[in-house]
Image: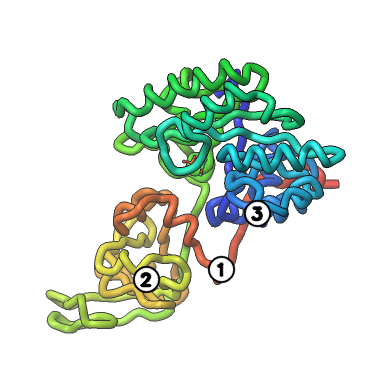
Amino acid sequence: VAPAACAAVVKADAYGLGADRVAPALAAAGCRTFFVACIDEGIALRAFLEDGDIYVLAGAPRGAEGEFARHRLRPALNSLPDLDAWAAFARSAAAAPAVALHADTGMRRLGLTPEELALLAEAPDRLAGVKVACIMSHLACADLPDHPLNETQCAAFADLRRLFPNARASLAASSGIFLGPAYHGTLCRPGAALYGISPVPEQPNPMTQVVELKARILQVRAIDGGESVGYGATYRASRRERLVTVGVGYADGYLRSLSNRGHGYIRDIRMPLVGRVSMDLTVFDASAVPDEHARPGSIVELIGPHHPVDAVAADAGTIGYEILTNLGRRYHRLYRGGEPAAAEA
Ligand SMILES: *Cc1c(COP(=O)(O)O)cnc(C)c1O
């Protein structure tokens, strides 16, 4: 995105991957600006991120302004009342953190409305004492490159930039970056793309996969044609089949909507998920896998090079974001690379 800077969105525990490990790795790689959803995430992040700007997208709850100062968190101010409350705090506090002003240019979810921005332009005194370090807005249709709302929002954001020429300008999240430099402003804000989710649906994913999810086979069994599998007997074998059962289920965020629709891989052999995903267990039809590779203890790839996160999401009828942010707490997590330089000392 150069010459723009690139921030990292690490909300929802870095999309389920562990912000305590992901954020320091990104910082070690040169990332200086981070976005989280809410104050608790900001406080947690500051504990393992000594430097760097941390923006809290939900803004500052009334009465929590002091916590923002204590932990050096920057609120995104999302309305005129938000701005007025922060301005009152900033004028009374010794060193109030800088803020982001979030304008709604068409998402209609969060941010100052066009009417509020017009009021603000007429009464700039309301900003007295407030350090606006960043102006931001969010695109509603960035993953649909031809959608006319993209240009509408881009133009509205350009107007906003003229009001705050000295603030950093941030419009693009993952997909917005791929709409081209006109959308980059001076600070991009990707989340999903950092974690390997495709920012350009319908096109080959330009991002490297960073997440693998593997499960071990607990049991192998043969069933005859006509026999059923799992709760509700929703799958019935049409012939003799060899099934493998792995110890992963919906309590691990392996979504129940994958029932009879998901896939696992042993080596490069694709196995259909059969029956319902249950809380702790899932069954695959391993009939095509040679015996020696489908034994108790053998590894099944649930997310990985053969079956990337977007493919799992397609099986489940959802988006990669929901697959990652649901990854459960029972997994044994291994992090490869990305050690902060200080850890070597
Ligand atoms: C979640 C979020 C992002 C990151 O979006 P991705 O599509 O994951 O890159 C950026 N900005 C805002 C306001 C968000 O809520």
Rendered view: 262 above or below 112: below
Is residue 54 shown to the viewer in this render? Answer: no
**Which label's residue is closer to the chain start, 1 or 2?**
2
| Residue 119 image point, x, y percent | 55, 27
Residue 154, disc? none
Residue topped by disc 3: 41
Name the amino acid, label 3. Answer: Glu
Question: In the shown orientation, is residue 42 left or right of residue 258?
Answer: right
Please rate how many residues cluster around mark 3, counting C-alpha atoms within 10 Å: few if below 14, some from 14 to 19, many from 20. some
Quick check: is the Cβ at mark 2 less than 8 Å away from ligand 1? Answer: no
As helix, strand or loop, the secondary structure at mark 3 comes to helix
What residue is rendered at 51% in x and 29% in y? 171
- Is 333 in front, or is 195? 195
Question: In the shown orientation, is residue 114 left or right of residue 135?
Answer: left
Name the amino acid, label 2. Answer: Ala
What residue is rendered at 52% in x and 47% in y? 210
Name the amino acid, label 1. Answer: Arg
Residue topped by disc 1: 329
Between disc 1 and disc 2, the foreground one is 1
Q: Are marks 3 and 2 in contact (CB under 8 Å)?
A: no
**Which label's residue is closer to the chain start, 3 or 2?**
3
Rendered view: 62 above or below 295: above
- Is 112 in front, or is 323? 112
Q: CA distance from mark 3 to mark 2?
A: 42 Å
Residue topped by disc 2: 294
| Residue 243 image point, x, y percent | 29, 75
Please rate how many residues cluster around mark 1, counting C-alpha atoms within 10 Å: few if below 14, some from 14 to 19, many from 20. few
